[in-house]
Amino acid sequence: MKISRIEAQKRNRKRSNIYLNGEYRFALDNEIILNYDLKEGDEITEEQISYLLLAEQKRRLKQRAYRLLRYRNRSIAEMKERLQRLGYETEMVEEIVRELIEEGILNDQKFVRDFVSDYTYLKPKGNVFIINELRKRKIDGNLIQEILQERDEKPLIKDIIKKRFGELDKGNKKQKAKIVRYLLSKGFTHSSIYEVLGEDYE
């Protein structure tokens, strides 16, 4: 078969229709056409066509992955699950995810560090909250613990108490119980809460 015509699409100038032996056969992104140096007059086999269409599918899938990452960062497991829900074959999803890992775009260690940073400086939450949320994203438990070892909840707890509750009555057990309930609801550990309250208010 011969490529008889390569014609840019009217509605999407980034794609072109491919005609074989005078008849429309399929369409490709212009980047694929350029990458594989396709030209009018070239001979092409069914095997080559299948390869080109597969290459375009992979490119589209990778573009979807990039769009997902523009919305927010994702763990490796999250990305795999999200791409598979789009209906792509597992093997193709695995290949694209592997490429993203090799390119440093997907990195669970960086994901965890960024996640912990967000919930330390932007929206302070405790270690229990962080562990539960990262487990939902199927992050390895050892990695979570490794990074949380570098984090001290106590300064966050003290700052929250100061901003939300102001001056405290050391002998006011009701107020202390209210503080404990609030901090637990934010995912702070019992040990850190009682250590701070014990040091400062008892």
Image (cartoon, rainbow, N blue to C red):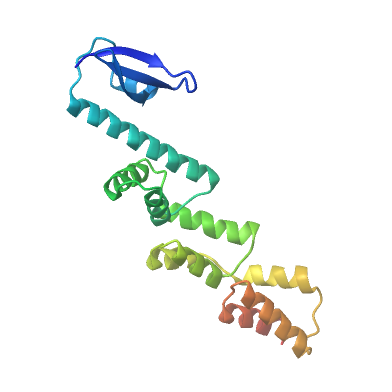
Up the image or down, 192 lies above or below 88; here it is below
Query: Residue 35's x, y, as percent?
Result: 32, 22
- The residue under the point 48% across, 23% down is 12
Q: Residue at x 39, y 53 (%)?
A: 76
Residue 97 drawn above or below residue 113? above
Whether residue 201 appears in this view of the structure is: no
- Which percent across, then down, holds residue 161? 73, 73
Q: Residue at x 33, y 42 (%)?
A: 99
- Quadrant including the N terminus: top left
Q: Between residues 2 and 198, which one lies in front from this camera angle?
A: 2
- Quarter where residue 95 is shown: top left
Q: Position of residue 112 (x, y in %)?
A: 47, 58
- Which residue appears farthest toward the top when viewing the image? 41
Q: Residue at x 24, y 26 (%)?
A: 49
Q: Quadrant of the C terminus?
A: bottom right
Which is more toward the observer, 34 or 12? 12
Residue 130: percent from left, percent from top: 53, 66
Relative to residue 175, is residue 20 drawn left or right?
Answer: left
Res 145 seen here: yes
